[in-house]
Image: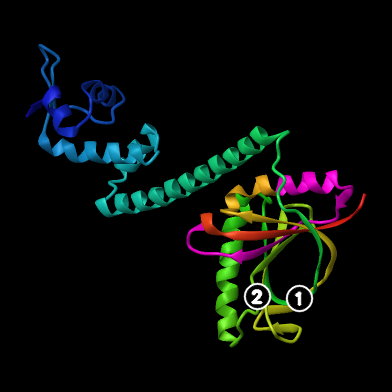
């Protein structure tokens, strides 16, 4: 048998924690000396301790841990719980990283207020273009919500075009519309093609209409940092006596595995104020 101190060292937990587990009936000592009240544990109890710690680290409350252990959870079931929790944590980490990137982008905008650079804003006509498109809905327009929606769309779009024997004739173009029910934003992922209007195997071919007058700006870098460029464009539109008449299109001029090297042109339809 082990004293509580020895058992704590072998289990890599604190004596205080073992006393707490004893008090709530989660892990009782194998023996308690009636004279000294010293607690003693058996090596076989390390198995239960390991399960308690694993389940607690997975985010379960001690009450939930007790219920799970009472059902004699197996090592395989614990492994399944661990994998599920691992996926949840990875998703949470990705979401937190995205939120931090958005905070950083907003902070950069705040720091630049009153000193926005004179970026190369152009007013030009955007000709109509025939595209193949796939569409889905995102909860919000922020990059953290758009990226998980638009990436699968482009992956599927590329696959379907390949199956149809079609090759894109230009860079990808994304455009957005308010959802009909007012909840979220409709995301359109498109690729220019030389095909007749209509649809093939669920793939729509449409003519993306001309924008008679658009204010354009080139964004360099990850789409996670596009808010700065969008707001620079908004300021220039206002300063030059125009008003926006729709969401800007995003034309992905250069893309690679390294998003910091992306080059994207924003094309925002405008009208005289």
Verify whether residue 60 appears in magenta. Answer: no
Q: Residue under circle 1? A: 129
Residue 71 located left or right of residue 249: left
Residue 64 located left or right of residue 32: right
Most foreground residue, 253 or 172: 253
Q: Residue under circle 2? A: 170
Percent across and percent down for residue 38 are: 13, 17
Q: Earlier in the sequence, mark 2 or mark 1?
A: 1
Question: Which region is colored magenta?
Answer: 230-259
Q: In the rendered image of this protein, does residue 196 appear above or below residue 42?
A: below
Verify whether residue 247 appears in magenta. Answer: yes
Residue 24 located left or right of residue 179: left
Colouring rule applied to residues: rainbow
Label 1 crowd (10 A; few <14 / some 14-19 / many >=20): some
Element type at marker 1?
Answer: strand
Element type at marker 2?
Answer: loop
Q: Residue furthest top?
A: 35
């Amino acid at each position: 048998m082990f004293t509580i101190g020895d058992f704590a060292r072998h289990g890599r937990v604190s004596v205080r924690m073992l006393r707490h587990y004893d008090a709530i009936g989660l892990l009782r000592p194998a023996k308690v000396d009636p004279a000294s009240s010293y607690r003693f544990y058996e090596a076989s109890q390390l198995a239960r301790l390991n399960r308690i710690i694993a389940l607690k680290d997975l985010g379960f409350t001690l009450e939930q841990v007790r219920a799970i252990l009472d059902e004699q959870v197996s090592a395989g079931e614990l492994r399944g719980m661990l994998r599920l929790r691992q996926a949840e944590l990875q998703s949470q980490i990705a979401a937190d990283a995205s939120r931090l990137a958005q905070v950083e982008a907003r902070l950069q905008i705040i720091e630049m207020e009153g000193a926005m650079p004179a970026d190369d804003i152009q007013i030009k006509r955007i000709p109509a273009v025939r595209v193949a498109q796939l569409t889905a809905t995102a909860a919000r327009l922020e990059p953290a919500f758009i990226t998980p929606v638009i990436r699968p769309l482009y992956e599927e779009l590329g696959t379907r075009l390949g199956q149809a024997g079609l090759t894109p004739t230009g860079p990808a173009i994304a455009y957005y519309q308010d959802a009909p029910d007012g909840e979220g934003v409709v995301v359109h992922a498109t690729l220019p093609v030389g095909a007749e209007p209509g649809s093939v195997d669920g793939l729509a071919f449409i003519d993306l209409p001309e924008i008679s007058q658009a204010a354009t700006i080139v964004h360099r870098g990850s789409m996670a940092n596009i808010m700065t460029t969008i707001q620079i464009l908004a300021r220039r539109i206002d300063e030059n006596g125009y008003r926006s008449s729709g969401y800007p299109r995003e034309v992905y001029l250069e893309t690679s595995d390294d998003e910091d090297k992306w080059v994207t042109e924003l094309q925002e339809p405008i009208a005289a104020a």
